[in-house]
Image (tube, rainbow, N blue to C red):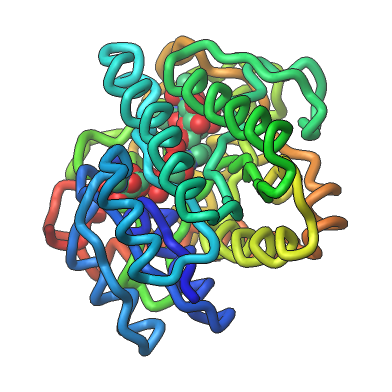
Amino acid sequence: MSILLTGGNGYIGSHVAVALGLAGRKIVILDNGSNSSINTISKIETINRAHVPYVFGDIRDMKLITKTLREHDVTAVIHLAGLKSVAESIEKPLDYYTNNVEGTISLLKAMNSQGIRNLVFSSSATVYGTPRQLPLDETHPTSATNPYGRTKIQSEEILADLARAQPEWRIACLRYFNPVGAHQSGTIGESPKGIPNNLMPIITQVALGQKSQLDIFGTDYPTPDGTGIRDYIHVMDLAEGHAAALQFLESHAGWHAFNLGTGKGHTVLELLESFEKASGISIPRKISPRRPGDVAKCYANVDKANRTLGWAANRSLHEMCSSTWNFCLNFPRTTTCTSPH
Ligand code: NAD
Ligand code: UD1
């Protein structure tokens, strides 16, 4: 009996693989390598001290998915595979709808054909659009301002329809807030192949001298220091949330959404200060205009996940920054903190 991790070679997937290993679960990873390295598998194996079967392939390849589900005796799927850049999704919407929405449908069809109906889906806080009230709880209306966000809303809606039509489905949509940090071993971490858009990978580029400065997008937001507030969550806390969700699904049918965050917001300057302390490096910065599409504040109400999943994020902002830096120091040669491809 195995858990299939689509996109399990990626940033979050590799940490989920480790968390599941620790929880004593057998896993199989399927990934097309579009944003990850094959080398990650051996790192996961070293941490887990177990062989991790790897299938190189695409979630849109229904035949391959069906074969994988059958051959590895899969009982549940954690579906992380997807494209995740907002900017790229605006330029190439069809790539995003094909990969993220069509890919999800193919996976669901393959699962249905094999009678496997347990699914944890990687969703995002982006489904809340511009917050109407804070903290954001799971009843907040969904909306999207870009194709990436729409692929997450559409996938969630498809999953909800499926659970309504076939009550044997057990589905948890995990709405991630802002994952940062790395495993304590420093061997797996965030390894985007292209140009990063998110704050932490950009800070590390500057720290490593690969970028001259950090642009701070806006200092006139209605926040204590004028910079944007986000709910940064340690990727290992996030990963452990997946193990908790799988356990929850063992006794709960239907469609469920959960926020995975800390419930606390931090400004850009707070994160910067914490990173500087953790790394001992000062980060040159420049005040820049607001980034289009950004909201002032975004943080979660995590009561539902705390109560229902028996899960809570407890690693500190300092641990998020120090583990990120530890990973970067292990792999400083490449363009971002990338383990060698
Ligand atoms: P990532 O790019 O590091 O990992 C995604 C993995 O999926 C990669 O290894 C990639 O090669 C693989 N992949 C992509 N398309 C595929 C396909 N068609 N078939 C097979 N494999 C495919 O990204 P991540 O940060 O680990 O994100 C994982 C999931 O979580 C994504 O669905 C993303 O949208 C979601 N999410 C991420 C964040 C974040 O800030 N990192 C926030 C919210 C939600
Ligand atoms: C972004 C995406 C969101 C996605 C999330 C996680 C946009 C508009 N939103 O959100 O859809 O779900 O990533 O992948 O892209 N910042 C800087 N300078 C930088 C980069 C960021 O000041 O160079 C600031 C931003 O203005 C924001 C904070 O840092 O206040 C966090 O930014 P980021 O890491 O991109 O995450 P989100 O804005 O939450």
In front of the other: 287 or 306: 306
Residue 5 visible in the shown view? yes
Q: Is residue 118 above or below residue 19?
A: above
> In percent of the image, x 85 and y 48: which residue is there?
303
Residue 207 visible in the shown view? no
* Place of residue 86 in the rendered image (x, y in percent of width and height, measured from the top left): 39, 23
* Place of residue 256 in the rendered image (x, y in percent of width and height, measured from the top left): 74, 42
Q: Please state if 56 lies on the left or on the right of 304 as rendered.
A: left
> In percent of the image, x 26 and y 42: which residue is there?
61
* Place of residue 99 in the rendered image (x, y in percent of width and height, measured from the top left): 32, 30
In front of the other: 23 or 113: 113
Q: Is residue 207 above or below residue 288?
A: below
> In percent of the image, x 34 and y 19: which residue is there?
89
The C terminus appears in which quarter of the rendering? bottom left
> In percent of the image, x 29 and y 61: which residue is there?
328
* Place of residue 306 in the rendered image (x, y in percent of width and height, measured from the top left): 81, 57
Q: Please state if 123 lies on the left or on the right of 26 as rendered.
A: right
Residue 200: name its quadrant. Answer: top left
Q: Please state if 167 lies on the left or on the right of 109 as rendered.
A: right
Q: How many marks?
A: 0
